[in-house]
Image (tube, helix red, strand yellow):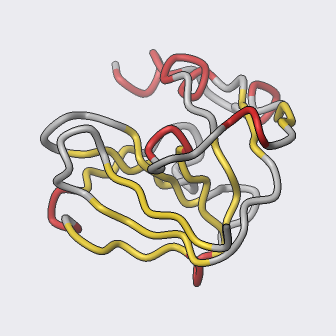
Amino acid sequence: MTGWTGSCHCGAIEFAIDGPIDELTTCDCTLCAMRGALMTKVPERALRVLRGRDHLVLYQWNTRVARHFFCAACGVYVFHRKRAAPDHFGVNVRCLRDFDVAAYPMRATDGASMSVVGPREECA
């Protein structure tokens, strides 16, 4: 398949990925570890928000370069603009329709070593 559609849990946000998915990644930074997302990296031009842009809530922490987007209604993480590759998005593949995670290779990302501050420091 060369394109995918997905949504948050409540359906308020719908999006499309134009193009193939080559691999999946996990990340062990504190945020990704807690949310348990399984992601794929896509170029900025390949991600389209079809509906619900007004439901996207931004969360930033650490260096505040990466931009993590969640649904304001159901709280599901849908995608984030990447810090290490700001012209790409990390997309939560668990939000994609009819997506078989077992059909793709998986790679672990060492996000923990990229943190410069802890989450508690930022929320205090």
**At 86% from the left edge and 36% from the top edge, which residue is drawn?**
107
Residue 40 rendering spot, x and y as whole percentages: 68, 51
Residue 28 rendering spot, x and y as whole percentages: 72, 23
Image height check: is 45 above or below 15?
below
Q: Is residue 122 left or right of residue 50?
A: right
**At 63% from the left edge and 57% from the top edge, which residue is drawn?**
82
Q: Is residue 9 left or right of residue 107?
A: left
Q: Which quadrant of the structure image shows residue 100? A: top right
Pick the residue in front: 99 or 50. 99
**At 30% from the left edge and 74% from the top edge, which residue is drawn?**
50
The total of numbered circles placed on residues is 0
**At 13% from the left edge and 41% from the top edge, which residue is drawn?**
73
Q: Quadrant of the C terminus?
A: top left
Q: Is residue 51 left or right of residue 58?
A: left
Residue farthest to the bottom?
45
Image height check: is 76 above or below 13?
above
Residue 1 rendering spot, x and y as whole percentages: 67, 67
Q: Which quadrant of the structure image shows residue 33? A: top right
Image height check: is 78 above or below 116?
below
Residue 64 rendering spot, x and y as whole percentages: 52, 50
